[in-house]
Amino acid sequence: MTQNRQTVKPTDIDVAVKDPEYEKRRKEWRLHEINVLSIIGVFLIITIFMLFVPRPTVSAEEQRQLNVRPKFSIESYLDGSFTSEFSAWFNDTVPMRSTWKHFIAGFRSHLGIPYNEAVLHGQLPNGDTSAEVPTMQTTEPTEQKVPGGIVTDFYHDSTEADATEATATEAATTEAATEEDPEDEEDGEITDSILVVKNRGIMLYGGSFSKGEYYASILNAYKSSLGDVNVYSMVAPTAVSFYLPKKFASASASETDNIDHINENLKDVTPVDAYAALLPHKDEDIFSRTDHHWAPLGAYYAAQAFAETADVPFADLDSYEKVVKEGYVGTLYGFTNSQDLVDHPEDFIYYVPQNDYTTTYYDIDMTNERERPLMLNLDGVERTSWYLVFMGGDERITHITTDCHNGRTLAIIKDSYGNALVPCLTSSFEDIWVIDMRYFKPNAIRFLKDKGVTDLLFAMNTFSATGQNSSKLETIMNQ
Amino acid sequence: MIFSSLIFLYLFLPLCLCCYAAVRRTKDRNMVLILFSLLFYAWGEPTRIVYLLLSAGVNYLCGLGAGKLGKVGRRIALGISLIFNLGMIGVFKYSGFLIENIDAIFGTDFPVPEIAQMVGISFYTFQIMSYVIDCFWEKVEPQKDPLKLLLYISLFPQLIAGPIVRYETIAAEIDHRKTSISDLSYGLSRFVVGLAKKVVLADQLFRIVDDSLAHVENLSVLGTWYGVIIYSLYIYFDFSGYSDMAIGLGRIFGFHFNENFNHPFLCKDITEFWQRWHISLGSFFRDYLLPLPVFGIRNKYLSLGLVWFCTGIWHGASWNYILWGVYYGAFILLETKLGKKKMRKIPLPVRHIYNKLVIIIGFGIFYFEDFSQLGLFLRNLTPFNPNGFFSFFEQMSLYNNLYLILAAILCTFPLLELPKKLTGKFEILKSPVSILGTVCCTGLLILSSILLVDATTKAFLYYRF
């Protein structure tokens, strides 16, 4: 038999090898081989990608600095911080992170179908939701040491365009990670209630009459402490009051009811009806579709209502320089990861006052005085952060001296909604002080008296007024 | 370190596989696996790896004693092992709970120790206990090589979240094993399927759970049912996904672990549910706890009570887990009392409705460690819910996640059996079905990897047990 095999022709060998069982096994082996090589191949490609492609350090969409690779030490290893930070760094800084995030947004948008053209991100507000989103608020650039040890003031005007784009981006995304107020952790609640409908993100409002009463009582206390100073309250409505489709009305509390309730509880504090000022302009771009703030145009109409209430001059919109930035995708994308939002950017249109004024900035403890432009140069600033154009953000005290000589000094105590009001009032008051109650360090009453304030405007949105931010008004009054 | 993390998938695992493939002898491969397993554990527990090593050392000696010594010596060795292992679990997992309850019951003021639970302690301690008991019962030959026993205890695929692998299952493979191409192929595919279950299904479902059950006080009747049904699906894909990954990894290295899940939601009654859910835990209690006399009395009801009490408390040091275990024990007792014949007489749809209701409400009990929240949950399932029968939320959420939920429900069925049956009948389909499987696996691996970029990924639920 063996001899026969040794002498048979090659064709006979083929016939002999074509044993069905052997063929079946060989086929199976090949199929297994294909499977193994394919899966290991994908593993290999992704491993090479993960290990050798440069890793990002910041995330523009999420407005934060990504985790940093920790340095090894025996202590950090033994306390577990090295391994946890290393894992966090490895997972957080995946090459091309924003591309994958965009893909994830697309994937999630296909997990179901819109309900009446809307997608809900998170749960419904529970009736006490509030605060103005500080964990994800538009972060601001600051003076900071950049790699290389050069101190660069990111907050520059067009003549100081020496800061590189990279520096700008880095600055614009650093602060949220480093300057977070521990209490702001709570503010993440707001991310749990966003409806995306017709390419517009709408924060659903919980509302709270009791917190509104508390807010009013603090404003009343300011008025009592300040005597003759004119005190105004402008509680700004948000997009939910104008663009929430009727069929979803039950998903949100009424902002106007809450604002009215606050106003009913004010004593000697003059309310400014921002809602009434905005309503006739509902069809204009008064609110951003992709950001939780109002648009500069909306702030202009609200400021007009305030100027009328305070009986001060007010500049016509035509007197401003209109600047249009295309491709704006604001903070709500970071919250929702909604493909609808990121795929439908909008124009960010702002107005630069043309009268004469000087803007001086201080740190939140009134130190480090420096003169800078009122409006931030947005060149190199990531598109999610364009709302920073007003004074560069919140974490500073701003003083504006204008060419309006009416002897009126205005102080604005505000959240970031108030920022957009400031350029609209440079023709209305001689001096304007802008402070953010979330960061302000001095005693507010003493500060306002020292500065000879004649008019005090509280300007913030409903989420702040009926949320935890209102308690910060009390804090700065007593600190 | 968890399996569904990029650092495990694309740093630890490739390194481990390269080193493993670089050596040929089983002895050397065992060393590679021991080193990587210790690295794996030390990554999460940098200092407390000492306890793992201590446990291996003590139980190695106890195993030898329980298997080789005389009658008294064997009992002493077994006793030492049980005291040591139960003591370890007691200190690291239950001491705080125990003191809290003593303080609450007796009005004492003992300080509650703040001892963080060790990752995977319940799993590896149970494994090592089963080994020593099996040595005592002479079911297995005691392992003479301490490194081999260390490999059994620390083997990273099943170290931190099971399945609880018996020593007898892999004893022979520790000494002699071979990974064939079909093992490798099966292991890789199974691992990827498990990863996808966790990342593509469980993590996405968890987003709904986070929006619903986490705010149970606001949920309507339908919203509460919706939330807990989604949670039931989530926990299944989370845990069975992990088990799939563990079994797949084991196969890649040539180990054949037993199955831990067998499509539990297809069960016809609660008894069957526990034959299909976390099989390795159920069989552990069945084999090692059920035969024990309780308070010196051999009584099947007392034993049943003990088993379900232990099943509950094994899951966590909280009363809701105990309640969860006892709750299942009660239904199993009821089914035992009724008997198989009477159970079978109940129409199948009724049996399915009955067991699904029990299972789903059971997972609600499992979810809420806080009893006041649990109370709200139970109330909100009923018409006494003050938030109404239904709300806009569950309607929106259901629409917005419709495909995900349908896919999840579909995946509770044995879908992967279909290709096997198909190719069994039609040989010609073998190649296209296999190639399709490969395409699906590579696609799922890529998709899962991308989804892992999102920082919201949750650790495995069973990681903490």
Image (cartoon, coloured by chain):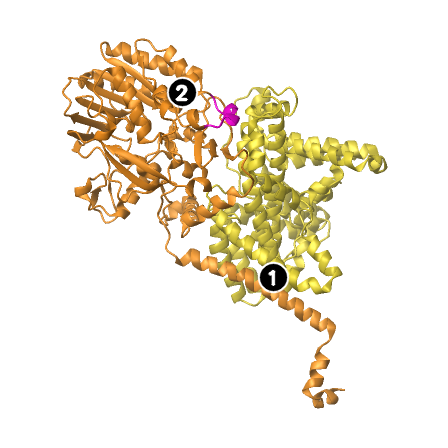
Chain colours: A orange, B yellow
Residue in front for this viewpoint, A296 or B339: A296
Q: Quadrant of residue B295?
A: top right
Total numbered circles: 2
The answer to whether tags 1 and 2 share a subunit is no
Can you say whether A114 is above or below A236 in the image? below
Name the spot of residue B297 as percent of width and height, x first.
78, 33
Q: Quadrant of the C terminus of chain B?
A: top right
Name the spot of residue A282 as percent of width and height, x first.
38, 27
Q: Which mark's residue is nearer the viewer, 1 or 2?
A: 2
* Kind of element beneath mark 1: helix
Read off the chain for label 1. Answer: B
Can you say whether B286 is above or below A430 in the image? below
Report the disc number at residue A75: none
Residue appearing at x 47%, y 34% in the figure: A197
Q: Looking at the picture, which amino acid does disc 1 mark?
A: Leu
Read off the chain for label 2. Answer: A
Q: Distance between the residues labelled 1 and 2?
A: 60 Å
Name the spot of residue B213 as percent of width and height, x first.
57, 30
Name the spot of residue A7 as percent of width and height, x first.
71, 90
Can you say whether A441 is above or below A324 in the image? above
Q: Magenta stretch: residue A252 in it?
A: yes
Mark 1 burial class by Cα count in 10 Å: few <14, some 14-19, many 20+:
many
Q: Magenta stretch: residue A401 in it?
A: no
Predominant SS along the magenta part = helix
Can you say whether A363 is above or below B431 in the image? above
Residue matched to label 1: B184
Q: Looking at the picture, which amino acid does disc 2 mark?
A: Thr
Residue A132 shows in this picture? yes
Residues drawn in magenta: A244-253
Residue matched to label 2: A466
Residue appearing at x 76%, y 39% in the figure: B268
